[in-house]
Amino acid sequence: MDPCLYAITALASALADGRNTDEIDLLSSIFLQIGDTLATIAAKKVLSEKLCDQQKTS
């Protein structure tokens, strides 16, 4: 198993420790939203770079 996965699992376990199911669900939703937002930002950057490159070659 990848050491990074161990670290992620340990972090998730530490975040969940002492919290009830509702709190864990909320944390899950927050981190999911962060991941989705980062993916959107990355996609926008790629698109912006492609458009910029197209304008340079036109």
Image (cartoon, rainbow, N blue to C red):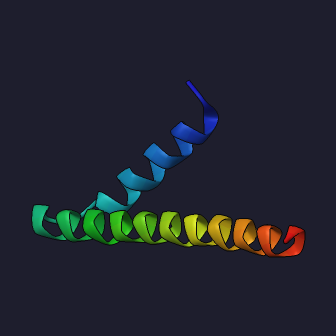
User: 39 or 16: which is nearer to us?
Assistant: 39
Identity of the residue furthest to the front in this view: 58
Q: Is residue 13 left or right of residue 40?
A: left
Please report the residue visible at 29 percent of the width from the left and 59 percent of the height from the top.
16
Residue 6 locus on image (x, y percent): 53, 38
Please report the residue visible at 53 percent of the width from the left and 38 percent of the height from the top.
5
Q: Quadrant of the N terminus?
A: top right
User: 57 or 19: which is nearer to us?
Assistant: 57
Q: Quadrant of the C terminus?
A: bottom right
User: 33 or 19: which is nearer to us?
Assistant: 33
Within the image, what quadrant is residue 33 found in?
bottom left
Within the image, what quadrant is residue 31 found in?
bottom left
Identity of the residue furthest to the top in this view: 1
Within the image, what quadrant is residue 37 found in?
bottom left
Residue 51 locus on image (x, y percent): 71, 71
Please report the residue visible at 49 percent of the width from the left and 69 percent of the height from the top.
40
Please report the residue visible at 60 percent of the width from the left and 41 percent of the height from the top.
4
